[in-house]
Amino acid sequence: MNRKAFTLIELMIVVIIIGVLAAMVTPRLSGRSEEARKKVVKTDIEVNIPTALKLYELDNGAFPTTAEGLGALQKEPSSAPNWQGPYLEKKPLDAWKQEYKYTSPGTHRTYDYDLYSVGRDGVESDDDIVNWDE
């Protein structure tokens, strides 16, 4: 007798095996997306946005003011004597689609600026991702 198809029992065993594998893998991956978001934001705060801010400072002699904010990296403010931008191609938003917080001069880093994300909860708290913690 030639068999050319799977039996219902064979298919059920395969479905059960896939279910068991999914049940084992899902808990390990569930926290990874949040962890990845935090790493992206950390990179923006430590590398991407500071690079644009330093280029702005080199061209204009100072960082954008708090009032000008990070928008000065995209559109020329009236106070920038030698603006060579845009220094960023798009509006800098964190992984939760919220604007980064920027203050210059900073409260924590008085020599340049404070840059941070309020994180997933959207309010200033201990889970913020900041540029002043070493």
Image: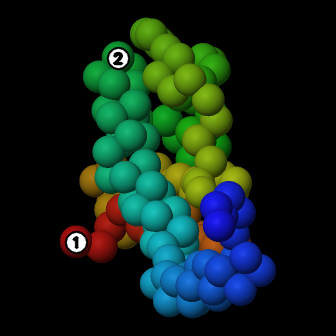
Q: Is residue 99 left or right of residue 36?
A: right
The residue that disc 1 covers is 134
Is residue 113 shown above or below 118? above
Near mark 2 (Cα within 10 A), the count class, few <14, some 14-19 or many ≥20, is some
Relative depth, front residue between 1 and 93: 1
Residue 22 lies in quadrant: bottom right
Residue at 38%, 40% in the rendered image:
48
Residue at 60%, 17% in the rendered image:
76
Q: Find residue 53 and report its horizontal and vertical position in percent.
A: 39, 35
Q: Is residue 106 visible?
A: no
Is residue 86 shown above or below 28? above
The residue that disc 2 covers is 59
Q: Find residue 77 and report its horizontal and vertical position in percent.
A: 61, 22
Who comes first in sequence, dot 1 or dot 2?
Answer: 2
- Work out how far the residue at label 1 is from the one at label 2, CA to CA, in angstroms: 28 Å
Residue at 57%, 47% in the rendered image:
66
Residue 84 lies in quadrant: top left
- Find numbered disc 1 in the image and state the secondary structure of the residue it sits on: loop
